Image (cartoon, coloured by chain):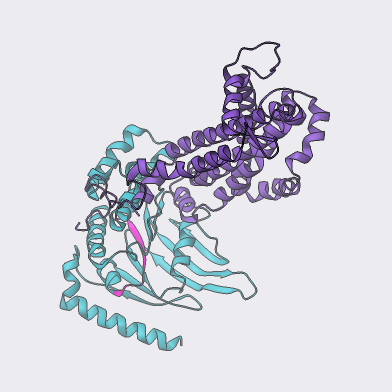
Chain colours: A cyan, B purple
Amino acid sequence: MGTIRFREVVKTYPGKQPVIALDRVNLDIGEGEFVALLGPSGCGKSTLLNLIAGFEEMTSGALSFNGGTVDSPGPERAVVFQEAALLPWLTVEQNIAFGPSVQKRPRAEYEPKIRELLRLVGLERFAHSLPSQLSGGMRQRVGIARALVMDPKALLMDEPFGALDAQTRMSMQQLLLDVWQSLGTTVLFVTHDIDEAILLADRICIMSARPGRITREITVDLPRPRSVDQLTDPAFIRHKAAIMAEMREAQKEHA
Amino acid sequence: MNDAPARALDAAPVPAAPKVKSRGLFPAGRTGAAMRAALLPILVIVAWQLAGSGGSLAGGVLPTPDRVWDAWVVWAFGPQGMGLNPYSGTWLSNVLFSSMRVAQGFVLAMAIGIPAGVMIGWSRAVSGTVDPTIQLLRPIPITAWLPFSIAVFGIQDMGAIFLIALGGFYPVVVNATHGARDVDRNWIRAAEMMGASRFDVLRRVVLPAALPAIFTGLRIGLGIAWTAVIVSEMVAVKSGLGYVLWDAYYVGRMDVVIADMLSIGAMGLLSDRLIVTVEHWALRWRRLQSASR
């Protein structure tokens, strides 16, 4: 279970000149679906993610997760932050254990799971390292493990690979594809990278800025399981060409 | 997974600091640094000694270093008794009197200042209720509290402890407030997303994140605590380094006055080192962070 539904959601930031971050946004994400939100910076895609995460409150409209309202953050909607946002005084292992431990789950239950996740993200040797001793890619893998340890119904990822170099980024994308393939969790993935959106998502929602709106939805029908090798496939290139055309079109309409 | 660990300590040893070439008088390394640090004090002492004649300078007002040293030796190790020198053999007990007052007052300052500061920084409601009062009282110098303190607590320990606690409290509370207010928003969001309650966030995110600022406040506060103990002992209590300082001045024992001043400095330095040691231990994670930058 992990359905997300936005109905005519508006988010404005008050001030002398109020900013309309989101303008009547409608979005449905089905169980186990991987949806990418693609758009330029400042188009409100992170705001949209913050609303479903429970970090911010919408101004008007209706927003539901699994049919229920969203009024605060919670472990069923795990967030992966852009800069990982690990707690710097905790080791890798302690960072991953933070969720289960504040939820008062028994140690015997989550400790084997943490070991398994450390293996999954390739950080077994770094269980007792501090975040500052890790590279950006490794830190983000801890961020993903920290989210997965809670068995979330949805993963909300806010440009998680945006700060990484190209090579690291590709290895992280492959890791995410593999993990998602085996777990089937609902994913909402915010990005400004067209390749990343096509490679990962079942569906791409293109957003435009000022006011933030979803202007196009494109289904990606590349076969699964996918891998980063497909970035150069003719089918992939065709998708990319079509999406770029759509984005130009959308830009013209909203200019 | 080909992104190699960039700064993993267990993967590669941290490169040793580049060898500093010795420049001029001093050899490189720790010994050289210690020698360099000792140079200025030694020069001052030698100049002071040479400027005096017959054991004093400035028209007999200031004793030379050797006289100060002699006075300290008698003060520290001389026989106690009702002789001509009332200070003989009382150094340690006076140091302990002052240190105990600083310790008691400062523990009080920490016990109130740290929780209060973290709460003010964390909760807008607490900030709005408590912070204006603190800011209103803070400009009153602790010396101005002396008559109040004597009137309320009399000539005894409690008056000194009150002043020390009050003087130490302000920097502790102000820095703890800053530390708790400047916590990275995403750390708090991450904790909430993982199911942390408000109290969990306070204890497991805000408090550790505020620790570096709290330690800064402790070090400043301890300095003020020493000021407060000397001031209150000079006026309101009949023992301790501050009492001896004023009493010795009154009877014209400037050698004891200077020995006393240096003793206060040494105790201040020692207690500061104590906090730095605790800080070093509590903020290990930060040391690794800066070492890898």
In the rendered image, the vertical position of residue B221 relative to residue A159, given as above or below: above
User: Relative to residue B227, is residue B25 depicted above or below?
Assistant: below
Residue B137 in the image: x percent, y percent? 75, 45
Considering every residue shown, the one lying at the far right of the view is B151
Range drawn in magenta: A184-194
At 16% from the left and 68% from the top, the residue drawn is A229
> Of A194 and A137, which appears nearest the observer?
A137
With respect to residue B36, does A200 lie above or below?
Answer: below
Outermost residue toward the front?
B54
> To which quarter of the image does residue A107 belong?
top left
Q: Is residue A68 visible?
A: no
Q: Is residue B205 magenta?
A: no
Q: Is residue B23 visible?
A: yes
Q: Give the residue displayed 44% in from the left and 63% down from the top.
A: A49
In this rendered view, identify the residue nearer to me: B261 or B280: B261
Count the marks: how many?
A: 0
Q: Is residue A144 left or right of residue B172?
A: left
Magenta highlight on residue A191 = yes
Left or right position of A238 against B70: left
Quadrant in the rendering for residue B152 = top right
Residue B213 in picture, x, y percent from top left? 53, 47
In the rendered image, residue A167, in percent from the top left (x then y), is placed at: 22, 65
* Left or right of A146 on screen, residue B190: right
| Residue B97 location (% of width, % of height) | 64, 23
Above or below for B62 versus B83: below
Q: Residue at x 49, y 54 (%)?
A: B184
Near-viewer residue (B264 or A236): B264
The residue shown at (62%, 19%) is: B93
